[in-house]
Image: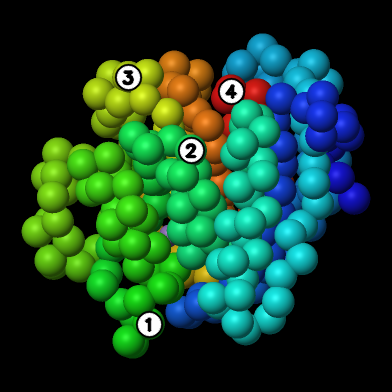
Amino acid sequence: MKFYCANHDFKKAKIVLLGVPYDGTSSFKPGSRFAPDAVREASYGIESYSPYLKKDLRDVKICDLDNIPLSFGDKELNFKIIETFIEKIVYSKKQLISIGGEHLISYPIIKSFVKKYKNLTVLHIDAHSDLIESYRGERFSHASVMKRVGEVVGFDNLYQLGIRSMNSTDMLLPKRDTNMHLFDLEKIDEFTERIGKNPVYVSIDLDVLDPSIFSGTGTPEPGGVTYKELLKCILYFGKLNIVGADVVELSPHYDSSGVSSVVAASVMRELLLVV
Ligand code: MN
Ligand code: MN
């Protein structure tokens, strides 16, 4: 099953959609590897038209490449598979939007983008800073993914929004006092201005949303933003030069109502229409 309206050929497509069903380092509750297919299924329950953006998915050439076939358990091997796969898309000059999977998938994806875009900016939206050095000795974890990403792109080029769960030492990292905005997404206008025309990779960890509207996630964090606040932030993306994006950390089975998958599909629709 493809995402609703994403049935164009790769060659003709403007945007490429890809599932990355990996949840090998989920520290609390695993299950995000089931998200790509749940999002695709939920996409048939919403309209293709966005009244917010006044655009329709039917008018955009999107190619859904299905899920990357990954191995189970071997992280290094999965990194290699993901990097090789993504590199081909990066050099095809198409925009890539990936559906996780847990947040660690952003690391190999961003590494592939950096090979082409040396001055890549990363805009990270999340409840968690994901900046710890390691999680129980594991340096490559969904809880440390932005630490590893910062080491690749430079912490000056990492902008973070919505953070409400962090380590007391996070602020010791470069530019965290100006590039990390806590609790809500209001600094998006300032960040948009500062980023300017630089190539941007956007990483949306859906647990930035409040668990009351998005319970289907492995590490829920109270005190989150509303859907409308996230949407308002996404509307700013139209001003940015976005080369790639991902939407991660939906774990559909923790929300028996299915609402979380619909929320994720709606976020995907707006992303596909705004970039
Ligand atoms: Mn995260
Ligand atoms: Mn998170």
Name the amino acid type tagged 3: Gly
Question: Which residue is at the far bottom?
Answer: 136
Q: What residue does disc 3 label?
A: 196
Where residue 61 appears, as percent x and y from the top left, is: 79, 24
Q: Quadrant of residue 37?
A: bottom right
Q: Which residue is mark 4?
A: 274
The part of the image, by quadrant, that contains residue 192 is top left
Point out the residue furthest to the top here.
54
Q: CA distance from mark 3 to mark 1?
A: 35 Å
> Secondary structure beneath disc 3?
loop
Q: Residues within 10 Å of mark 4 (few under 14, many from 20)?
A: some
Q: Quadrant of residue 165?
A: bottom left
Q: At which x and y percent is residue 128?
A: 35, 59
> In the rendered view, would you say 73 is above or below 208?
below
User: Upstream in the sequence, badge 3 or badge 4?
Assistant: 3
Judge depth for marks 2 and 3 and give the one in front: 2
Judged by depth in the image, the label closer to the viewer, 1 or 4, is 1
Single out the mark in the foreground, 4 or 2.
2
Residue 58: give its label: none
Q: Is residue 171 visible?
A: yes
Q: Residue at x 86, y 45 (%)?
A: 2
Residue picked out by circle 2:
116
Q: Is 138 situated above or below 39?
A: below
User: What colouring style does the render use?
Assistant: rainbow
> Which-is-in-front pick, marks 1 and 2?
2
- Tell whether label 4 touches label 3 (CB within 8 Å): no
Q: Residue at x 44, y 17 (%)?
A: 239
Whole-angstrom CA distance, mark 4 to mark 2, is 23 Å
